[in-house]
Image: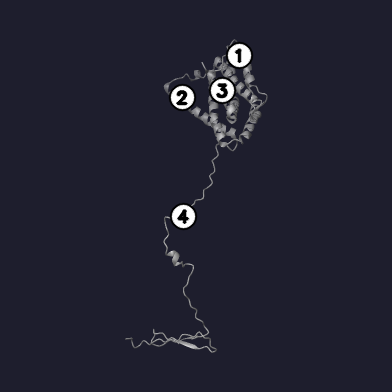
Amino acid sequence: MKPPHIAAATVNLPTLTPSPQPSRTSLHYPLHSTPTRITLTNSIRVPFISYCLNSTTTDSSTSSQPQDESSPNNLLPPVKKKRKAYRRLRPGEAQGITEEMRFVAMKLREKKLKLETDKLDERESEGSDDDDRTWEPELDGFLRYLVDSEFVFRTVERMVDESQDVSFAYFRNSGLERSESFAKDIEWLGQQDVTIPEPLFTSKKYVKYLEELAAQSPPLFFCHLYNIYFSHIAGGQVIATKVSEKLLEGKELAICKWPGDPEELLKGMRDKLNALAQHWSRDEKNKCLKETNKCFMYMGTLIRLIIMR
């Protein structure tokens, strides 16, 4: 049984037939004891709305289907854009291959000085004082240095002149040629009742190695060629001058005479080698740097011949 204070609701739906005179429709709601009247006119059409969709609404057919985690698209890792990697330049690379070789030579020299310092410390701790006597130059050793140096210079200069490779033409008639100068000094010493020795086996082995490089890998041969001249100008002739002052009464040796400024002549060869090396691969340049160690190690053995007893 309904409570007595709630009245029935009467709803008169508007007709769909247009009328010249708007009629009024009353709506009574049972939520109040006093009826509330809302007036509607027939001129207002009430649209029929089946359902609504907005931007946040998704289709029930698609949302109701679970995603297959084993599908190929879900198994693939996310695509990451690779960052372009830039190779770090080697010391001196921006200036040219000769500057790179100079850094390698400096590193080798620092290592050598460290070893000599360690040996000197060991001798001082043992109380040995024969270091000055060990480095005393000998005439026989200096003559052997001249003979082996002439053998090496004559060989590399002959290979440069006789090679059919067009790149060898860059280093002909450079003004740095030393084989004739070494030959003159050897001839002068031969007139002083001194026996001229044959080149050592180590020098012959090194020359054979250079001949193989000239035929198989010109860039590696050019590395030795430049370093041979560089080591003679930077160290060889300086030591030869001191030896001459001590053993030969200060005679001016032919190996210390140049047709011009030796530094400028060496700079000319350096510029040509840098220009030629621009066409080499990075792998060829790295091999040249390894050959730098071999060249300076051998040139060091030549210098040590001066103190050979």
Q: Are marks 2 and 1 in contact (CB under 8 Å)?
A: no
Q: Position of residue 71 (x, y in %)?
A: 44, 55
Separation (CA) of disc 4 from disc 3? 63 Å
Q: Which residue is mark 3?
A: 208
Mark 4, residues whose alpha carbon is within 10 Å: few (<14), some, or many (≥20)? few
Q: Amino acid at mark 2?
A: Lys
- Mark 2 — residue? 119
Does dot 1 land on a helix, a strand or a loop? helix
* CA–CA distance in space, label 2 to label 1: 35 Å
Residue 13 screen position, x and y as percent: 46, 85
Q: Viewer-proximal residue, 103 or 261?
A: 103
Q: Amino acid at mark 4?
A: Asn
- Determine whether the residue tagged by mark 2 lies in a helix, strand or loop: helix
- Of labels 3 and 2, earlier in sequence is 2
Q: Which residue is mark 1?
A: 189
Residue under numbered circle 4: 73
User: Are dots 3 and 2 in contact, CB under 8 Å?
Assistant: no
Lower position in the chain sequence, tag 3 or tag 1: 1
Cα distance in 3D space between marks 4 and 1: 87 Å
**Mark 2 or mark 1: which is in front?**
1
The amino acid type found where label 3 is placed reads Lys
Q: Tag 4's secondary structure?
A: helix
Q: Is residue 16 above or below residue 272?
A: below
